[in-house]
Image (cartoon, rainbow, N blue to C red):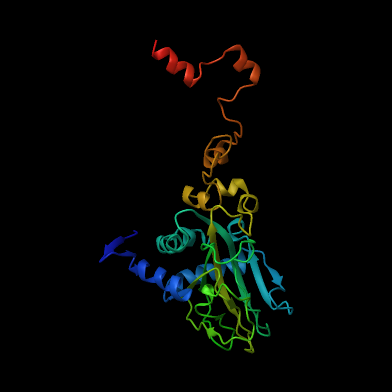
Amino acid sequence: MTKALAVADDVIVDGLNITERVAEIEDRGFTIVEDFITPQEVARIRHAFDSEVHITEMRAIGTKTGRTWRAHNLLAKTRAVDYLFLDSRIRALVEGVLGKYTQINVTTLFNVLPGETRQFLHQDDGLWPIKRPHPHFVCNALIALDDFDIENGATHIVPYSHKWYDRPVEQDIETLRVVMRSGTMLMWEGGLWHGGGANTSKDRERLGFFMSHNVAYLRPQEIQLLSVPREVVREMPEKLQRLLGYHRFGLGVDGRDPVDVLQDGIVIHPTAKLAEHHRADPQPTDSQRSQHSTR
């Protein structure tokens, strides 16, 4: 059961000090949470990668070898990670960085194989053409399923670079390597310069689970409303449905809650009628009602 406490103005969720972690992300661009998931959880997710999800080769962000396997669009392929998107610590951290209104941006299991080269350093919030500085758009989390070390390509990051608004990403800058044990989570703000490392080992893979959130008013990189079949989404908890984009934003669907439309498929408001009906049975306007009541 989730336990959220406020201790000396700090928010604590299931033993994790959210206030301190969000402050770290704001300051240096990232935080590292050891033992975020258990070995049993790691084993279940690894099994899903090996037996449930279809994968593709990735040749992008400077890599051309095909030695990275990626399984995008995870929520259409497996139920093994649903609970992590609903994890109370994840939710508190993401909302602490991005604010209340968030949605799922990208869902990925990846495996970096021996012989893969280093990625270019890059930012994950550059897709939207809005000049920096701007509010936080993206908050990412990477959970190590294998141990990440220098030999098998531990992630490169550049601390504080999310605040460097006046320059493009520099490829020859000194980086910090995120060495972490299986079950550890790295979370960072979308503007942080980062990139996957080269796997120079002979026979050691580097499996990780990547989840990205963005603010709900920007289009996500993976179009979740189309990516995950509706018959699958209908069986999900409402909170996860909301995170996929079925949230009430502005008018919703003809004035209806998108979750209701997801369930019943009615895209025209039940009270909507053709113009001829309204002309034949005119209803008094608010102004007319007000005038009538004062007579």
Image point (43%, 64%), residue name = 93
Q: Is residue 78 above or below residue 59?
A: above
Residue at the far left in the pictured view: 8
Residue 79 appears in the rendering: no
The C terminus - image quarter? top left
User: Based on the displayed image, in which of its 4 quarters is residue 27 positioned?
Assistant: bottom left
Image point (43%, 18%), residue name = 290
Left or right of residue 1, residue 272 in this image: right
Residue at the far top in the pictured view: 295
Q: Is residue 60 above or below residue 287?
A: below
Front residue of 76 and 16: 16
Left or right of residue 110, residue 102 in this image: left
Q: Is residue 130 above or below residue 168?
A: above
Residue 126 appears in the rendering: yes
Report x, y in % for residue 49. Answer: 59, 68
Front residue of 9 and 241: 9
Report x, y in % for residue 201. Answer: 62, 89
